Amino acid sequence: MNAPAALRIDRAERVELREAAATANPLGIAQQRLMGLMLLFMLITLVIGLRLVQICLFGAPDDRTASVGTAERGEILDRNGQPLATTIKLWAVAVNPQKILGDKNALAVKLNQLMPEKSVDDYRRILFGKRKFLYLRQPAPPELAAAVHALGEPGLLLLSEPHRLFPQGAMAGHLLGYSQEVEDGHGHSGITGIGVERFFNDALAQGKSIQLAMDTRVQAAVENEIQRRMIETQAKGGAGIVLDVDTGEVLAMASLPDINPNAPFKGVDPSDQQVMINKATQAVYELGSTFKMITFANAIEHGVITDWSKTYDVSAPLQVGRFRIKDDEPKKRPITTVEIMTFSSNIGTSQIALALGAQNIDAFFKTLGLDKRTDIELRERGQPQYPTQWGQSAVMTTSFGHGIAVTPLHLARIFAALTNGGVMHPVTLLKRQPGAQIPGQRVVSETTSARIRQLMRLVVLQGTGTNANAPGLRVGGKTGTAEKVNQFGGYDRNANITVFAGAFPMDHPRYVTLVVLDDARPTKETYGFKTAGWMAAPVGKRIIARIGPLLGVRPDLAQDIDVSDLMPLILEKKDPSKNVVE
Amino acid sequence: MIVATRLSAVWQVAGVAAAALCCYLVSQSVAAERAGLEKVDRQIAQTHDDIAKLQTEIGVRARMGQLESWNRDVLALQAPRPSQFVASGVQLASLYGHRGQPALQLDPAIAAQQGLPTNVAYQPAAPAQAQPTPAAPVAAAPTPQPAPAQSMLRTAAYLRPTSDRLGGSAAAPEAPTLQKASFELKPLTIDAHKPKPITADVPKIKSEPVVPAPKKAASPVKLAHADPIKSLLPADIGQLAAREAHGAKDSSKAAR
């Protein structure tokens, strides 16, 4: 009724209009509609097809798979695949006080019952506070997590967090180390830490596992025996290394007192950084008479030692500048070249060094890498204290390991080269694959190496190292004693650094074992002596006796290296069963 | 025909709809399969997690420090001594049996089938007679003489005094009456010019019959400068084997 005039068309007119339109092109309209419908279906089909192609080619995005294969920090494994460091998920209990729904006073009491390290008042302060997140226990045992969950309070948060775990506890603490992110106070963050965790941090963070050359059993034996000896001799510290002479792999590396990488700072005085120092790779020591082997190898190579029956007068000390070179066990008779080594005569070795000359010694030391850091995969690598001037005193004192300070790892690497036939391999913490080509540099000839092996064996059979003679394992080596450098840069006459560096079995050396004791005190068992033959050599024997069979070296009393050509040149024979430290 | 022509559009629409439905069903099927795979993946990851947790727990509970502590307090195990390694067959044989009794009991089934081995000790030197030789084709082997019926498997055993067996008795033990070993080792010789049958390096047993001679008639071989046997530990047994071999050699020389 109120419709516009244009719409008020009578029925007859509308019928006419409809008929006119229908008769105009009815089939065309139907076809257009059908075509449109078909295009719509085709479009839908196309979309479905594209979707199928996308699923087939790229997969479906699914949030549920996000938790699968999340890159966790990689593991550190020993050479036999045993985990040394792994990541586990631990519960943590946290609270968001703003989301607490129940009675906060009652909740504080319940929390105090579950976690009594905080008082009820503490919990009340937390729950009525304005913070939005606070850890209550991190990590939390599963039982506690279940009990907190049972409280049913949405403001209490149970978080599953990754946690780095070192299953062996404090074993190889310095070697495995730790890695953590720290802020420098200016908003910048960085990585700090020590050991393998720090050195391989990037690879581990990407989820890659690191397989070390270390053998857990050998590491445990080394640490245990050094620890035992430290207790017996009240030593302040100790270090030990077991090295494969043919591959340069480090099978064990101990630095005691150790740290527990699970909680590296627990019980450690933050101002005392000494405990964090890796005594095997970072601390440098004057390693004493063990350097005589290096001097002898150098002298054989340069033709200074050709006649082993040649005698040297060692009856009187040598005065060089302000140094007075004397022997621990003075001999009032000329001694043979072999006896210089077995008796560990500083005077005799100094005379050989003088015959060698400064240039030869400097060059040989540099060939052996004594003037630079080792190339092991650690950031904690000590810089040797190398002589700057090669005067007569330096020539003589360095020949028996004074006036030059290196890390124990330097010496272990050199002993490996001297015994394996004369090739120096780079030391590595990583396991080498069987058959892999190992880089090496020849430093002495095969002949020299063979002679050095004889000398090492003689030192253990008849010299200062008899206490290192593990039965049947054909141990050879050299002891070294040096007075400890005190905090003022002088020598402490009452404190020694005692070293035993050896290899076994000497008829075909496979492993170098090195032990260093810091300030070991004489005992009744050592008859008051505090030299390396009484302090460090027994540890060497204990370690080798334990690890030899583990490493496939069968003890055999009927087998040994042939030293028959040198043995007659030792005029004073020792009774092997006398004064033995077990 | 006309109907079909007029309904062709309908058929086309129906066909497209059916195709779309099929595609949709395929899509659903693929999605279901993928979901199943993801579920399996999650289960595998969960199982790996469980394994890792258990291994970690085992690793922590059996860490070397803990084992060392148990060993120090309870087990007291030590590194093996050289004498605990068997270097030769002779030493191994010396570990087997004592006073004619086998150290390890044989399986009853085997014993019933093959008979119990004859236990023999090292026999004292007897007048040279024949003894069965090993079956290996040893060149220039002596002609075997008729031997008493005897099993090929025999037990070499040491006879040692009953007292002080564990080294704890203060009573003076009787002199050990070790009997002479009746074998000698022959080095393997290979002549490159004269091909011969390969002769195995078999201990050549001297032609001596195993006659149960009266013990008193046997001249006991005293160990030269040897202390009475103190214990039954493998170390001492190994030394005993060496000494006995030495003693046998001496006595064989004396016999010649």
Image (cartoon, grey):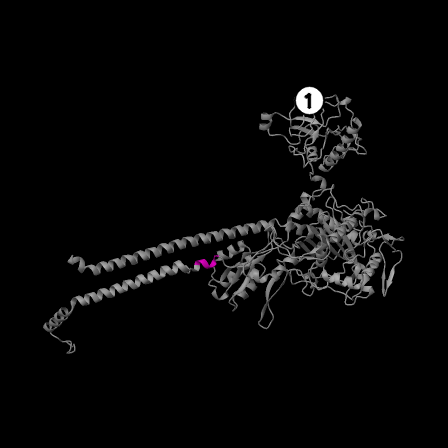
Q: Quadrant of residue A181?
A: bottom right
Q: Quadrant of residue B247?
A: top right
In this view of the protein, can residue A260 be seen by the observer?
no
- Give B104 or B110, whichever is nearer the viewer: B110
Q: Which residues are magenta?
A: A64-68
Residue A465 sits inside the magenta stretch: no
Q: Which corner quadrant holds the N terminus of chain A?
A: bottom left
Residue at (15%, 58%) from the top-left corner?
A: B2
Give the x, y percent position of residue A146.
51, 55
Q: Chain of mark 1?
A: B
- Give A104 or B134, whichever is nearer the viewer: B134
Task: Answer with left or right where residue A346 lies relative to residue A380.
Answer: right
Which amino acid type is marked by label 1? Gln
Residue at the disc numbered 1: B145
In this view of the protein, can residue A193 be seen by the observer?
yes
Q: Magenta residues: mostly which secondary structure?
A: helix
Give the x, y percent position of residue A328.
84, 55
Seen in the picture, residue B130 relative to A41 is either above or below; the reply is: above
Seen in the picture, residue A460 relative to B185 is either above or below; the reply is: below
- Give A177 or A170, whichever is nearer the viewer: A177
Give the x, y percent position of residue A237.
73, 57
Task: Answer with left or right where residue A219 lies relative to residue A531.
Answer: left
